[in-house]
Amino acid sequence: MDLALRGKVAVVTGASRGMGLATVRLLVEEGVKVVAGARNPGDGLAALGDAVTPVAVDLATPEGPGALVQRAIDEHGGLDLLVNNVGGADVNFGPPHELTDEVWARAIDLNFLSAVRAIRAAVPSMTERGGGAVVSVSSVNGFLPEPDAPDYSAAKAALVSFSKTCSKAYGGIGIRFNVVSPGMTATDLWVGDGGVADQVASQTGGDRDAVIEEASAMAPLGRFTEPEEVARVVTMLCSDATSAVTGADWVVDGGVTPTT
């Protein structure tokens, strides 16, 4: 399907693997020039050719997201699309009130303020170009808070709220803001080394494969969502195929939410 994105310029955060890499790949297939940010860009981005500019950047720092957006402006004269994908979570096996300020700050910087800072840098350029689209990747935990990840849940809820606020503030100048909220997805956050499955197995004395199987059974589809399935929704929301959609939160969770 041709989404009429050819010639657009996009910035994607957390772009080196999982949903971020899958999104970059689909955008490139649609003819988009992508400036892709990650702490370690890796071979996956390099393999996508000249349409991608990999940038090594720490997006949890105050200056990181703005520097990434500025790279797109410097190289391409501006940007049309912003995908705030970077994020991460650790499982907290203690009571929520025991989380330290450092833990809270790390979660909020990575999962919320990284997007705020990228948006701050991107809006002036999008305004000059007559509009644009911002898609932020949240989580079902933004509206289904998880006691084992209160910092992550709160940060993702803030991301959804801020995106909806921006949809109202900037709709009149043609910038759309939408959110995609995945559920359990087969990315490093869940199934990678040291991910949620490993953390739960270590804490409970169980087996990581059993943890993954039990989690998969929670979804009516009986499996984890694949990164590409989330990336398809993100890419569509970047396009004029959804030109009347703004302020929305698209849930991609294999059917978990209706059962809770």
Image (cartoon, rainbow, N blue to C red):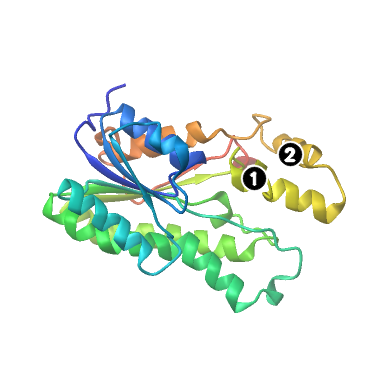
Residue 36 location (% of width, % of height):
36, 46
- What amino acid is at disc 1? Trp
Disc number at residue 97?
none
> Which of 14 and 129 lies nearest the eye of the viewer?
14
| Residue at point 73%, 39% (across, down) | 212
Numbered tag placed on residue 190 in the rendering:
1
Compared to residue 97, the image places residue 148 above or below, namely above
Mark 1 falls on what kind of element? helix
Q: How crowded is mark 1: few (under 14 residues within 10 Å), some or many (20 or more)?
A: many
Tell me the quarter of the image containing the N terminus: top left
Q: How crowded is mark 2: few (under 14 residues within 10 Å), some or many (20 or more)?
A: many
Find disc 2 in the rendering and name its residue: 212
Residue 243 in view of the camera: yes
Asked whether the viewer can see residue 143, the reply is no
Q: What element carries label 2?
A: helix
The quarter of the displayed image where residue 23 is located = top left
- Measured from the top left, where is residue 150 in percent x and y? 63, 65
Residue 47 in the image, given as x and y percentages of width and height: 40, 31
User: Label 2 is placed on what type of residue?
Assistant: Ile
Q: Earlier in the sequence, mark 2 or mark 1?
A: 1
Task: Determine contact: label 2, label 1, CB under 8 Å.
Answer: yes
Question: Picture coordinates of residue 32 (x, y %)?
Answer: 26, 35
Determine which quarter of the picture holds residue 255. top right
- CA distance separating discs 2 and 1: 9 Å
Which residue is at the far top? 1
**Does residue 255 appear left or right of residue 6 in this picture?**
right
Q: Which residue is drawn at 85% across and 53% down?
A: 204
Mark count:
2
User: In the displayed structure, would residue 50 be above or below residue 150?
Assistant: above
Residue at the (50%, 42%) spot, across then down: 251
Residue at (46% x, 54% y) in the render: 39
